[in-house]
Amino acid sequence: MYYECMEIIVSPSDLTFLFQLSPWGFYQKYRHGIKRPYVPFPSIFTQIDNIFKETLEGMNLKDINESFPDATIGHSDEWVVSKPIINEEYDIQVVLRGKIDSMLSYADGSYGIVDYKTSKATEESIIKYHLQLSSYAYAMKYPKNNKVLYDNVHTTGLLIYEPNKAKYKGNQCALMGHLTWHEVPVDLETFENFIKKDVIPMLAGDMPKPADDDPFWQYLSSLGFRFTED
């Protein structure tokens, strides 16, 4: 018997941040189209990100540091869309859609995904991005149009820039810092099961009660809003 499923397109970054920070907010966004209040993102970080992409394209990571992968940084800002992920127990299917910072090309014909970050390189910050990188890798291996361009993606990682000092000469200033590579292991089977067993059932069920420490609900609570179950 055929059942029509509701298709929900999910941003990889929302799996990394919103789903973890506020399941209630994630549900509101993807089931009801109610987004959290806009938080301005400093444009300087976008500018730094674009400079990295323009400067590093065509370079081998190993030329930057001997400990980095022996891979060439390729084209940037490629949009990827996954095939629907389905849990047959529910009438919702999830499609992943996001934009990859840059691709890595290895001499053996395999590929990698690199995401640029300007931040402090902590173990916690590195671990939390595995869902975002897994989303990209999944969409590349299982694209929506079934046209697989990068079937053999075997590396995903973060290239983190951590500024720590500035140098001046006249009216010119150079912001100096460490550039580190952090490989993030990706298990696509485990990731797919996470979408099937955690994300889809939550989206298909009743609206979750916001947690007491949910920062978005705390804001609404301060304005007098109260949560009631139907």
Image: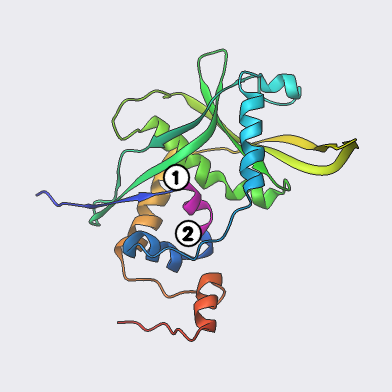
- How many numbered marks are there? 2
16 inside magenta stretch: yes
Q: In this rendering, which labeled residue sits more in front, label 1 or label 2?
A: 2
Quadrant hosting residue 112: top right
Q: Amino acid at mark 1?
A: Phe
Image point 63% across, 38% down: which residue?
A: 49
Quadrant hosting residue 182: top right
Where residue 216 appears, x then y in whole percent? 52, 71
Where residue 128 appears, x then y in whole percent? 59, 50
Q: Is residue 98 left or right of residue 215?
A: left
Extreme residue in the left direction: 1
Circle 2 residues within 10 Å: few <14, some 14–19, many ≥20: some
Please say if the residues under marks 1 and 2 sit with CB atoms less than 8 Å apart.
no
Where residue 98 appears, x then y in whole percent? 44, 41
Q: Amino acid at mark 2?
A: Phe
Q: Which mark is residue 19?
A: 2
Image point 62% across, 20% down: which residue?
A: 71
Above or below: residue 174 compared with residue 104? below
Where residue 70 appears, x then y in whole percent? 65, 19
Residue matched to label 1: 191
Magenta residue span: 12-18
151 inside magenta stretch: no
In the structure shown, which secondary structural element does the residue marked by tag 2 occupy? helix
Above or below: residue 1 compared with residue 36? above
In the structure shown, which secondary structural element does the residue marked by tag 1 occupy? helix
User: Quarter of the image containing the C terminus?
Assistant: bottom left
Magenta highlight: main SS: helix
Image point 55% across, 44% down: which residue?
A: 130
